[in-house]
Amino acid sequence: MSLLSRYLGPKQAFEGGLFLPDQKAEYARQPIETLPVDGPLHVPLSHMADWSVEPVVRVGDRVLHGSLLSEPSGSAGLPVHSPVSGRVTAFSRAWTPYDGLVPCVTIEPDERNEVLSSRHGFENESVIVQLARHGVMCQSPRAALHEYLHAAIARGVGDLIINAMETEPYLAADLRTVVEEPGRIVDTACELADALGVVRAIIAVPFRHRRVVRRLNSEAEGRGVEIVALADVYPQCSPVLLVKSLLDREIPPGGAPLDVGVVVLPLSSIRSAAHALLDDRPVTHAVMTVAGDAIRQPGVFRVAIGTPIERLANRLGLASPMHQVVFGGPLTGVSVDNLSTVVTSECTGALFFKSRESVSPVPCIRCGWCVEDCPIGIAPTDFLKSESRSAASAMVLLQADACID
C-alpha cells in the first residue's frame, strides 16, 4: 500500500454503491469459537441436490470425526465426511437452505470426538486432487472447487482474486479469518496460484481494517501475492466489480470472470481449502456468523455440518421469538421458514430476526437515485415500460443481463 493511499484512503473503484450500517461491532473483535455438538446431526449426503452420491455407511455403523459417509457415483460431486464420532442411526431427508430437501444420514454423537487419522500423504497428490478428496466446495460460483479450477486451467486464466470484501451488514466470518489466520490465507493463496499457473494473485480486503491489511502485507511480502485494500462499499463484494476495480476488465453482460481470464474465489472457499491442504483434513464444519436482534450471544462460530438451526439458536439464546431466519447476508442471503433446516458447508451466516421486514412500495417519482446508486448504471425505470421479456427492447434486455443482483 502506498503512503498516499495509507493516509487518504483507497481510490473510489466505481460509481454508485452504498455504505451500509455495520451491525457487527459487538462481536467482530471476538475470536472464532467452536460450538460442541450437543445432539444428533443430520448430515446431507450430497453438497448439491443434482449430484448423484452413494452412501458408504449403514445404520448401526460407528464413525469417527472425518470418516467417509458418501462418495460421488457419477462424474460430478464431492465426498461427504462425518463431523463427529458416533453411531449412524438412520437415513432420511434434511432440509437445506440452498437445495431444499436432500438425502441425509443421522449420526448420534458419542461425546468422545475421536478423529480419523490421516492415511494420505502430500508427496504424490496434486493440490486439485487434495481438494476433491477432502470435499471442498466453492460458494461462488456454486461448484466443486476442484472442478472450477480445472475449468479455469482449461481456459488459460492469468489472474486469481481472493474475495475478502465482506461488505454486507452482520457478517464477520471472513474478517475473523483474516485476523486470526493471515498466514494460512496467504499460504493457501500461493498453493492455488501455483496450481492454476496464474501470473498474478490478489487478496482484496476492506481498507478500513488497516491492521488486518498490514498483517496480510507482512505475510505476503516476497511471495508473489498482492494485498489490495478497497473501499468498504456495497456491492464491492461482487466478482464483476472486483474484476473491474482490480484489473480494469469488464465482464460481458451475463458472463463470468473466466470469460476475461480471471478466477475469483470467496474467502470461505480459501478457508476450507486451507483446512484441506495445510491440515490434510476434510470439510466437516462451517465457519459462520450467527447474529441478528433475536440472538443473545452473537458471534462467529465453527459449527458442525448437519446442525439444525433451531438447536443453534437455542444454544446461543433467543432474546425474543424469531420471525425470520436468513442464511447468508441480509442482502444476498436466502430466507428460510423451516427451523429444522441444517447447516451445510456453504453456510457463512445465520441471522435471526425478531420481525419480518414488511415492504410498502410507493409509486416511482423518477428521482433517479436508484440509477445513481447502481454501480452498473442500470435504469430500473426502463423495466417499468416492458410488461414481459418478449416486449422488451434490446437495450432493456442487455441491462437485465448486466444486472449483478
Image: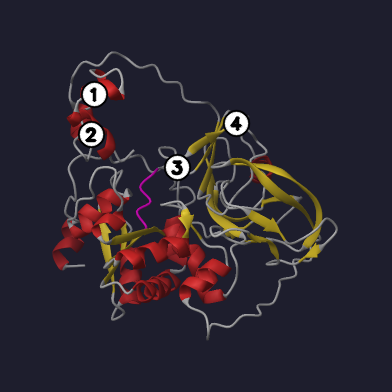
Q: Amino acid at mark 3?
A: Gly
Kindly identify the residue that appears in the image at 68 percent across and 43 percent down: 94
Q: Which residue is mark 2?
A: 399
The answer to which of marks 2 and 4 sits earlier in the sequence is 4
Rounded to the nearest angstrom, the CA distance separating label 2 from label 4 is 32 Å
Asked if one can make out residue 74 in the rendered structure from this viewpoint, the answer is: yes
Q: Which residue is mark 4?
A: 337
**Circle number at residue 329:** 3
Quarter of the figure that contains the C terminus: top left
The foreground one among 387 and 30 is 387
The answer to which of marks 1 and 4 sits earlier in the sequence is 4
Magenta highlight range: 163-168
Q: Which residue is mark 1?
A: 392
Q: In the rendered image of this protein, does residue 381 appear above or below residue 102?
A: above
**Does 346 sit left or right of 193 as displayed?**
right
Q: Which residue of the protein is positioned furthest toward the front in this rendering?
A: 74
At which x and y percent is residue 146?
47, 65
Kindly identify the residue that appears in the image at 21 percent across and 15 percent down: 365
Rounded to the nearest angstrom, the CA distance separating label 1 from label 4 is 35 Å
The foreground one among 293 and 142 is 142
**Does 396 sit left or right of 116 as displayed?**
left
At which x and y percent is residue 400?
27, 33
Tell me, yes or no, whether the two marked residues, 1 and 4, touch with CB atoms within 8 Å.
no
**Does 379 sit left or right of 237 as displayed?**
left
**Mark toward the viewer: 1 or 4:** 1
Tell me, yes or no, whether the two marked residues, 2 and 3, touch with CB atoms within 8 Å.
no
The answer to which of marks 1 and 2 sits earlier in the sequence is 1
Q: Residues within 10 Å of mark 1 (few under 14, many from 20)?
A: some
Rounded to the nearest angstrom, the CA distance separating label 1 from label 2 is 11 Å
Q: Amino acid at mark 2?
A: Gln
Q: Which residue of the protein is positioned furthest toward the bottom in this rendering?
A: 123
Q: Residues within 10 Å of mark 3 (few under 14, many from 20)?
A: many
